[in-house]
Image (tube, helix red, strand yellow):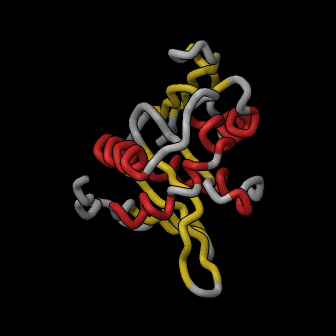
Amino acid sequence: MKEAQAASYSVLKIHEELRLRPYAGIKDAVAAQPWYSDREVLRMSEGMETGVYDSAAILRMYSHLSGAGELYMIEVLEKDGWRPIGDAALLENNLPITIGDAHYRSRGIGRCVLDRLIGRAREKGWQMLKIGMIYSYNERSRRLYTGAGFVPVCEVVDANGNVGFSYERKLQP
């Protein structure tokens, strides 16, 4: 699999101990392997029937996301340096955020990341953000996005019959 080229965007600082770093290729896909082997992560992001991702699948996913928009690794500052704990992407038609390390879930990191990505979309002059689908059973993500001003616009059913909703949020300049 081909190594990623350097991103044309830079690190987005959230606060002293949290940042979004542009995707850097194979080393990030390797770091993400445990997240995409976690059935809970896969169920919430990809659907109930999704099997564990191998490194080739992660590289394909990251290649797609980085080619379609801006792909970041969510990093926390620990005593031995920055450590990736998840990923997030800013695309015109989607805004996926994954906190892969279970230790960092339900700590408000997703909201901090979402707020920073909304700010980045404003910097780019975007008028609207869209989310293709959040599964109806994914209450945590539904609360995250609606709490940030996203509204459901229609019901969506995936290829396996799982129901979810697409969301939108208008951005003020």
Q: How many marks?
A: 0
Residue 124 visible in the picture: no
Residue 167 visible in the picture: yes
Residue 39 screen position, x and y as percent: 65, 42
Residue 31 screen position, x and y as percent: 49, 64
Judge left or right: residue 91 versus residue 67: right
Residue plotted at (64% across, 35% down): 43
Observer-nearest residue: 18 or 54? 54
Observer-nearest residue: 97 or 44? 44
Residue plotted at (56% across, 32% down): 50
From what the image shows, is residue 70 above or below residue 163? below
Residue 156 screen position, x and y as percent: 57, 15
Observer-nearest residue: 127 or 79? 79
Residue plotted at (25% across, 60% down): 3
From what the image shows, is residue 36 above or below residue 49? below
Residue 139 screen position, x and y as percent: 75, 33
Quarter of the rendering containing residue 68: top left
From what the image shows, is residue 35 above or below residue 129? below
From what the image shows, is residue 22 above or below residue 120? below
Judge left or right: residue 73 versus residue 113: left
Observer-nearest residue: 168 or 94? 94
Quarter of the rendering containing residue 42: top right
Residue plotted at (73% across, 27% down): 137
